[in-house]
Image: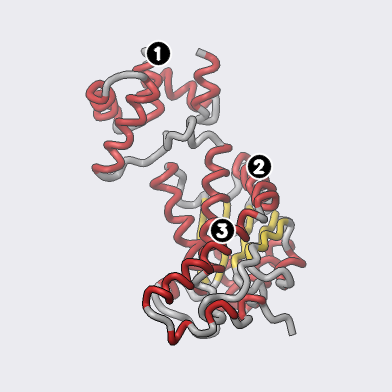
Amino acid sequence: MNISQTENLNKNTENIDTATTLDVVKMINNEDFNAVNAVQKCLPEISKAVDIIVENFNNGGRLIYFGAGTSGRLGVLDASECPPTFSTPETMVVGVIAGGDHALRHAIEGAEDKPEFAKEDFDKLNINENDTVVAISASGNAAYVVEILKLAKEKNCKTIAVTSNKNALTKEFADIFICAETGAEAISGSTRMKAGTAQKLILNMLTTASMVKIGKVYKNYMIDVKPTNDKLKKRAVKITASIAEVDEQKAQEVLSANGYKIKHAILNLKYGLSEDEAERLIKENNGVLRKIFEKL
């Protein structure tokens, strides 16, 4: 039987139930460092995965996460944060959890063991060869994600597996196998802990690095942020003022007038371009501000 390393007993925490409260949290914190170190060892694979995602984005494809339980929730979380952060369409990065949205807040018994759930979820999305399918599973053995990868390969999709088990079944069906070996959990088998932390770090990298590569970031400014609240509107003003080299009051005036289109405001303030001229350049250069600056 293929038993995940995450199910092993952790010798470092075997007396956690008799420890002081401070020592309990110290034990957990010490184990958390393993998650960061494990992800660092996966950077070459993560980089390759990003290149695949970017290529598929440029061909009109999507990034689609599939997972069950904690893994599924993390995929949904990462996907849901892309539209406000990068102004992506809600269909560009998608998160799917076994058992449906109800499973986000409630455990659905046995959902990860049901390949029929995978078929149903996969078919709903009309997945094609331009899409990147990412299967997230701490053990990499859940029937749901294994079936997802099989279905994706039938559609000639590029596939990525994210796991903490080097012997995961998902390895057989993944073009890129990202295995952050976090080891035994502080509480045996509780993969919402180190394995989940590693998954969150990896998903952060997959989307953030991909968005950087397709021009959603200039320097390290979030230039495609969707200013839907006061905090984000203030951020948009600071970004615009800094890049356009004007004071914040002037940036505020232009952004208020154009509906908080940051790139348009920067091109207006920096080069005196009208909104139509800015829009043309943005489209011609796929929204990459650095390319536009090089031409002006």
Q: CA distance from mark 2 to mark 1?
A: 31 Å
Look at the picture and state if 210 lies above or below 101.
above
Q: Which residue is mark 1?
A: 271
Count residues near mark 1 (Cα–Cα under 10 Å), then give few for <14, some for 14-19, many for 20+: few
Q: Is residue 289 above or below residue 101?
A: above
Q: Amino acid at mark 3?
A: Val
Marks 3,1: beta carbons within 8 A: no
Q: Residue at x 54, y 15 (%)?
A: 295
Are the residues at dot 2 and dot 1 in contact (C-beta closer than 8 Å)?
no
Q: Residue at x 62, y 72 (%)?
A: 183
Element assignment for label 1: helix
Is residue 20 rendered to the left or right of residue 144?
A: left
**Which label number is shown at residue 82?**
none
Q: Quadrant of residue 26?
A: bottom left
Q: How many marks?
A: 3
Q: Residues within 10 Å of mark 2 (few under 14, many from 20)?
A: some
Residue 62: give x, y in percent of width and height.
58, 50
Percent of width and height locating residue 276: 40, 20
Give coordinates of residue 272: x percent, y percent: 36, 13
Q: Is residue 71 visible?
A: no
Quarter of the image for the N terminus: give it: bottom right
Amino acid carrying label 2: it is Glu
Residue at image point 64% right, 63% down: 180
> Quadrant location of residue 161?
bottom right
The disc placed on residue 55 is: 2
Task: Indicate the secondary structure of the residue bearing disc 2.
Answer: helix
Q: Residue visible at 45% across and 60% down?
A: 77
User: Is 294 in front, or is 63?
Assistant: 294
Give the residue number, with chain letter if any, for mark 3: 36
